[in-house]
Image (tube, grey):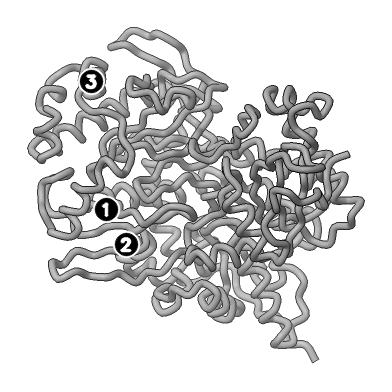
């Protein structure tokens, strides 16, 4: 006999948290809703952030070495030009030694005034650990961004009392922090953010401090599922890939208990808002809809974020529009370098009001945590661009607030044969092929295939896919190939008559294969994500090995499914 799913009332005492937050954010909501004001003042807002940053850090070691005091005394664009002349564009390794002094020796006034007591430990799937300073000012900036999430949700038409009448679940990394003998704390950004959760927000926070501390992701997902299956979860924040893993575990736990459910809607009937970021949502869309409703019905509201350990970048501000509005007044300043120029020592950089639509830019930021002209590494395109002013003179009219889409990473690309493929091309092609064939896919990555006996040079897509026949996979490869061609003239040229590159190879793997690979790297859970492409075969062959296929032998015969 099956156990019935628990039902919950639409409002509870905790709904008052939403009432209070809505009241606190009334003025901010009006400001954010005034898109004309943001369109006309975005560039000026960013110049004000730069002035504040330079003034605050002028007495630091870095500020004195780079003469911040000289730049801050100049007006507007002159200040910006001076700053660019004084400070070179740099990556994390340029700050590595200074950050080590701040973290290991608790040395104050290096990159930011005073002693920095918190550091976020971040790592990619292919690089070593990095430590990012998180100052008190950055905590305030992130908290303001978090409040803006709810403010934009209000402007979407979402009821905050309705959301906060239940639980808000956060799919983050471990909140555990290590503390040095000098009192400096290091850990996942989730741990630093957890220090900001106080009453009354603690009343609606899930999964609770005990589960949040867990660092074994497999155990953590299981504990989350068992803890939340009877909770009235109304909002979830996390990456789509991990959300799907949690939903699958919820179904398994429900079946163990005799609850024969087939959709998330049956478990969390009041679930209203999914806040997500970190990876492109499109390839997961069909599978998420199926798990939510058993068909094509979507979660009532979705809101996309562009977060980073170094600072919050942007938040989606329009329902059903993928563009995310740049956070122009959060004590961080953003510059944008054309992708083709990022490795030049004299690379040009532009403010959000100086960019062009249709151009790919690498994000560079200066932050209230002491990172100066720091290459974030993400590649973005602008959907709307604000007006450009030189002083009070209008130089160019804008068409909206600065809104961006993340299209890849500037180090994640494939150009083994002159094809110039970036992550966006792969993501869009997988999304299109999955939609055309009406199949559900999971994680994926692409890599070059080098020519060998009886095998042409080309591209391999390794793909988690549900219950696809050989015929479907052949059609998937064909649609994937067409979609890449539609986006990339270089690839089209190389593929012409199969002269330089053969058809793409699609290698199907079981669901969970990529997460098993990430677990083998110690990168499972939290904000870790699978690279969508690489200009080498290391990742592809490691995933193939984990999946039981084995690395692609340079002399092997092509056996995988290819586009016709």
The residue lying at 60 percent from left, 56 percent from top is 240
Q: Would you identify the image quadrant in which residue 51 lies?
A: top left
Image: 256 above or below 469 = below
Q: Which residue is mark 3?
A: 85
Q: Nearer the viewer, residue 485 or 453?
A: 453
Q: Position of residue 202 (x, y in %)?
A: 38, 70
Question: Which quadrant of the rendered structure holds the N terminus?
Answer: bottom right
Q: Earlier in the sequence, mark 1 or mark 2?
A: 1
User: Residue 317, can we see it?
Assistant: no
**SS type, badge 3:** helix
Task: Give the label, 3 or 2, closer to the camera.
Answer: 3
Q: CA distance from mark 1 to mark 3?
A: 26 Å
In the picture, the disc for residue 553 is none
User: Would you say the residues marked 1 and 3 are in contact, meaning their CB atoms lie under 8 Å apart?
Assistant: no
Q: CA distance from mark 3 to mark 2?
A: 34 Å
Q: CA distance from mark 1 to mark 2?
A: 8 Å
In the picture, the disc for residue 134 is 1
Density class for disc 2 (Cα within 10 Å; few <14, some 14-19, many ≥20) is: many
Please state if 530 lies on the left or on the right of 88 as rendered: right
């Amino acid at each position: 006999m099956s156990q019935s799913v628990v039902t919950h009332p639409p409002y509870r005492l905790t709904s008052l948290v939403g009432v209070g937050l809505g009241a606190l954010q009334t003025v901010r909501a009006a400001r954010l809703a005034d898109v004309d004001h943001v369109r006309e003042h975005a560039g000026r807002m960013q110049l004000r952030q730069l002035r504040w940053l330079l003034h605050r850090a002028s007495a630091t070691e870095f500020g004195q070495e780079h003469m911040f005091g000289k730049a801050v005394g100049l007006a507007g664009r002159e200040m910006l030009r001076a700053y660019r002349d004084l400070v070179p564009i740099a990556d994390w390794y340029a700050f590595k030694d200074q950050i080590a002094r701040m973290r290991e020796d608790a040395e104050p006034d290096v990159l930011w005034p005073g002693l920095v007591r918190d550091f976020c430990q971040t790592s990619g799937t292919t690089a070593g650990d990095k430590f990012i300073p998180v100052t008190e000012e950055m905590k305030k900036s992130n908290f303001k961004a978090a409040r803006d999430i709810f403010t934009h949700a209000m402007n979407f038409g979402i009821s905050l009392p309705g959301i906060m009448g239940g639980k808000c679940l956060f799919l983050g990394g471990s909140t555990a922090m290590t503390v040095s003998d000098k009192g400096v704390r290091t850990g996942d950004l989730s741990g630093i953010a957890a220090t900001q959760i106080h009453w009354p927000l603690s009343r609606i926070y899930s999964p609770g401090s005990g589960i949040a501390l867990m660092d074994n992701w497999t155990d953590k997902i299981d504990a989350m599922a068992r803890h939340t299956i009877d909770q009235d979860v109304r909002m979830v924040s996390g990456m789509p890939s991990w959300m799907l893993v949690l939903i699958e575990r919820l179904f398994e736990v429900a079946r163990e208990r005799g609850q024969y459910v087939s959709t998330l809607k049956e478990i969390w009937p009041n679930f209203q808002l999914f806040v997500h970021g970190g990876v492109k949502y499109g390839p997961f869309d069909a599978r998420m809809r199926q798990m939510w409703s058993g068909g094509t019905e979507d979660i009532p509201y979705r809101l996309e974020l562009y977060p980073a350990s170094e600072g919050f970048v942007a938040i989606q501000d329009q329902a059903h529009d993928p563009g995310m509005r740049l956070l122009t007044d959060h004590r961080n300043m953003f510059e944008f370098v054309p992708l083709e120029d990022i490795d030049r020592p004299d690379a040009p950089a532009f403010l959000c009001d100086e960019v062009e639509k249709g151009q790919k830019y690498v994000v560079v930021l200066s932050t209230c945590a002491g990172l100066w002209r720091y290459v974030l590494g993400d590649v973005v395109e602008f959907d709307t661009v604000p007006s450009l002013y030189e002083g009070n003179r209008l130089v160019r009219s804008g068409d909206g607030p600065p809104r961006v889409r993340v299209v890849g990473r500037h180090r994640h690309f494939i150009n083994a044969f002159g094809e110039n493929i970036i992550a966006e091309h792969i993501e869009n092609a997988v999304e299109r092929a999955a939609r055309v064939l009406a199949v559900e896919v999971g994680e994926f990555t692409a890599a070059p295939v080098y020519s060998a006996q009886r095998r042409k040079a080309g591209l391999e897509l390794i793909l988690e896919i549900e219950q696809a026949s050989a015929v479907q996979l052949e059609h998937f490869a064909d649609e994937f190939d067409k979609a890449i061609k539609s986006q990339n003239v270089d690839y089209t040229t190389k593929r012409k008559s199969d002269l330089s590159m053969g058809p793409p190879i699609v290698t199907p793997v079981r669901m969970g294969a990529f997460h098993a690979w990430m677990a083998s790297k110690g990168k499972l859970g939290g904000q870790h994500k699978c690279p969508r492409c690489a200009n080498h075969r290391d990742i592809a062959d490691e995933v193939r090995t984990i999946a039981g296929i084995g690395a692609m032998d340079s002399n092997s015969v092509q056996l995988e499914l290819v586009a016709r």
